[in-house]
Amino acid sequence: MKTNSLVHFYKVNDSDHPVKLEVEVGHGQNSNSKILLNHLPVPGPGPEGSFVRSFELILGTNKELQGEELLMTTVVHDIMENTNMTSLTISLTGGVKPYTKTLEHSASKKGEVVTYSANIEFFK
């Protein structure tokens, strides 16, 4: 199993404006994501409270997120016949400025699992 990691600091302010997380899984692959916000699980609509494939989520307001930490683990299953490429694009909007990062990794063979992890800290 291969792992790709992202660590980022996201600047927020004192407003009540919501901060949105968008996750896009590329290349038509399957995935499951688990999210912790300040070490507490954020329940998703999928199996065992996970988020399946691509999704959007309001994390809270700028004010609420100050000093918080988001941990996300996404397991991508290579199911496509025509490619072993996997990718995960993470976008945050609503804070001081938008942020987008794409991580990519090629699975060695069809059926392999690639794990992506993200650690994002919100600061003022």
Image (cartoon, rainbow, N blue to C red):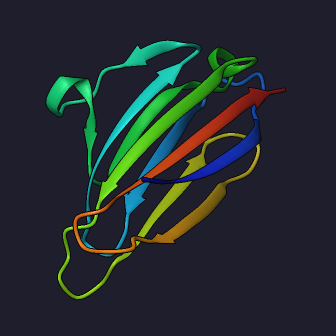
Q: Is residue 41 left or right of residue 77?
A: right
Along the line of sight, the residue nearer the viewer: 54 or 6: 6
Q: Is residue 63 left or right of residue 45?
A: right
Image position of 75 with respect to 86: above or below:
above
Image position of 112 with respect to 48: above or below:
below
Along the line of sight, the residue nearer the viewer: 42 or 29: 29
Image position of 23 with respect to 70: above or below:
below
What residue sits 59% from the left and 47% below the top? 92
What residue sits 75% from the left and 32% below the top? 12
The image quadrant where one finds the C terminus is: top right
Q: Is residue 52 left or right of residue 23?
A: left
Residue extending furthest right? 124
Along the line of sight, the residue nearer the viewer: 83 or 122: 83
Residue 9, horizontal then vertical, whole percent:
78, 39
What residue sits 20% from the left and 76% below the top? 80
The image quarter containing residue 65 is top right
What residue sits 25% from the left and 72% below the top? 28
Residue 79, horizontal then vertical, whole percent:
19, 68
